[in-house]
Amino acid sequence: MRFISLLLLAATTLTPQTIQGFRPGAEYQILSDPRRDPWQKPDQVIAALGVTTLQTVAVVENGYPYFAPRIASLVNHVYAVSNDSRSFQGRGTISAEISPIVAPPNAPNIPTASVDLVLMVDMVRWVPQRPAYFLAILAGLKPGGRLVIIDRKSPAALPAQQQITTSDLKREGALAGFTFSQELTFLPYQYFLVFRR
């Protein structure tokens, strides 16, 4: 059911031309479709992250990896985290700079004190116990590390259990031990929140 909801949400932000050729089994092709680029703005997002070649990044995505391969060439290493093993199917040979992690929805399974940045994209609303999840992320971050959350701006359009506001996330992040740093506003459909360890 969660996967069907994901597909429907992806469909609402893709153009009609993108959905027209959709066929069952092509869920991850839709999520990685380059026609997502104009509204997801991956180059602008990655530039705003300010990653460096010495850093290790965990990218927590819901579905087919979209940001992980783009970031992998810019940093030392990427952990690509998904709670669905199908996320890594059809990828061919995965780059040596990427370690795929299939994790349960309640824990990212990032190695302790191993990453400089955790980027969560369209994932936070699927996490059933966010305070515990944020604590697990905190444990995976190196001192001074960052958590970046990119998710839907219009929670009222989502099912009740996914209606998470930026105020909710700032409060829950603070309870887990994060300090809210900034909110970037250039994405048309998503908020972009930055927290520091």
Image: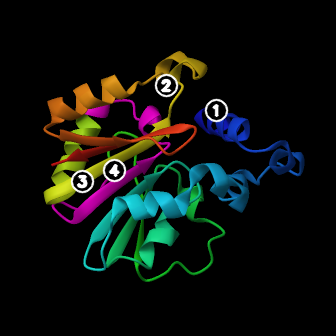
Q: Which residue is mark 3?
A: 146
- Residue 162's tag is 2
| Residue 124 falls within the magenta-colored stretch | yes
**Gap between marks 2 and 3 measured at Cα:** 23 Å
User: In the visual, does 9 lie left or right of 81?
Assistant: right
Q: Earlier in the sequence, mark 1 or mark 3?
A: 1
**Which tag, 3 or 4, sits closer to the chain's start?**
4
**What whole-number distance in Å separates the C-alpha atoms at marks 4 and 2?**
18 Å
Answer above or below: position of 96 versus 183.
below
Q: Secondary structure at mark 2?
A: helix
Q: Is residue 130 above or below residue 68?
A: above
Residue kind at label 3, given as amino acid type: Arg
Tag nearer the camera, 4 or 2: 2
Q: Which dot marks residue 108? A: 4
User: Spatial distance from mark 3 to mark 4, Cα to Cα?
Assistant: 15 Å
Can you identify the residue that label 1 sits on? 5
Q: Position of residue 112 (x, y in %)?
A: 17, 60
170 left or right of 19?
left
Q: Quadrant of the N terminus?
A: top right
Amino acid identity at mark 4: Pro
- Mark 3, other Cα within 10 Å: few <14 / some 14–19 / many ≥20: many
Task: Tell which tag, 2 or 3, sits nearer the viewer.
Answer: 3
Between 109 and 13, which is closer to the camera in this rendering? 13
Q: Which residues are magenta?
A: 109-131
> Residue flagged by tag 2: what amino acid is it?
Gln
